[in-house]
Image (cartoon, grey):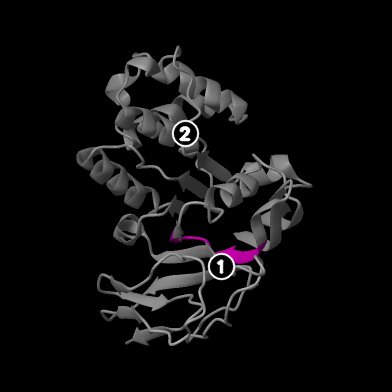
Amino acid sequence: MIEISHLIKKYGGHTAVDDLSLTVEPGRIYGFLGPNGAGKSTTLNIVTGYLGATGGEVKINGFDIFKQPEEAKKHIGYLPEVPPLYMDMGVEEYLCFAAELKAIEKTRRRQYIQEAMELTQITDMGKRLIRNLSKGYRQRVGLAQAILGYPEVIILDEPTVGLDPRQIMEIRELIKKLGEHHTVILSSHILSEVREVCDYIYILSKYHTPSQASTPTKPFQQCPHHRQLPEKHHVSVLSKTSSHKTVSRKTSHDTTESPKKPEISTLLLPEKFQILVFSDKGVDVNI
C-alpha cells in the first residue's frame, strides 16, 4: 500500500527525517507515535505530496509520489494538523469545492458529499459558515473532505489536538468507523490516543550523542519479529496479539553523560497488544 525507502528531508543544516524506511499494509489502522520533533508531520507531508524530499522514495499503490503525484494522490485522503478550511465558505460549499479539486465525477459528487457528511455527522451543519463552527465540528469537516471519493488510505495528523474530552471520544469513534473500510494512519505523540483505536503502532524517534549527532550511543537491542531499520531514524511496531504485555526499561550502569531522551519507563498496554520496542539501552519485553 505505502512503501517508504531511505527517506531523507533536510532544511538547510537541520535534518528532519534521516534515512527512514517503513511499509504500511492495507486494511489496518496504524498509529504513528513519537515525541515532538521526531519527524512525524514532516514524513506525512512528504507521503501526501505536500513536501518534497531531499532523498529517498515513497510509493502509494505502486505510484511514486514524486514522479507520478497525480496518480499517487488519488489513493490518499489527508487531514493535516491544521485543517485546510476556508472560513468564509459554508460546509457544503467547501465540500463541493474539495470534490472539484479531487476531480470527482460530477455525477457522483452530490452522493459522495452527502455520504461523507453523514459519516462525520455534520449533515445538520451543511448550510452554516465554517467560521461559526466549533473546533470539533471543524475537525469533522476536515475529515469529511479527507474521505471524499473514498480513497484507500486516510492520513490523519494529530486529529484531536485542542479538542475537549467529549470531542476527542467522538473523533476516536469516527476513526474506528473509517478503519472498517480504509487503511488509516493516525499521527500522534500521545500513547493513550493511538492505543484506543490502532491495530499497529509505529514508534519513531531520534537519538543523538553529545559528540556525534547522527549516531546512537549503543546498538539497538533486537526483539522477536523486530525489523531493523537505519539507526539514525528508528521505527518499531506494536501489534495486537492475545496477551497482556508489560514493557520496562533496563537500568544502565553507564555513567557517561548523555543528552535527555524520550523516557519509556513503564508502559501498561491494553490486552491484545504485543510490543516490539526500540531502545538504545535495551528493553525487556515480558510476554
User: 118 or 266, which lies in front?
Assistant: 266
Residue 30: % across, % down: 45, 60
**Few, some or many residues within 10 Å of mark 1 (<14, 14–19, 20+):** many
Q: Is residue 266 above or below residue 104?
A: below
Q: Residue furthest right?
A: 67
User: 148 or 206, which lies in front?
Assistant: 206
Residue 39: % across, % down: 56, 53
User: 37 or 241, which lies in front?
Assistant: 37
**Few, some or many residues within 10 Å of mark 2 (<14, 14–19, 20+):** few
Residue 251: % across, % down: 38, 84
First to last magenta residue range = 19-30
Element assignment for label 2:
loop
Circle on res. 259: none
Q: What residue type is labelled 2?
A: Val
**Magenta region, main secondary structure:** strand
Q: Quadrant of the N terminus?
A: bottom right
Q: Is residue 253 above or below residue 38?
A: below
* Circle 2 residue: 82
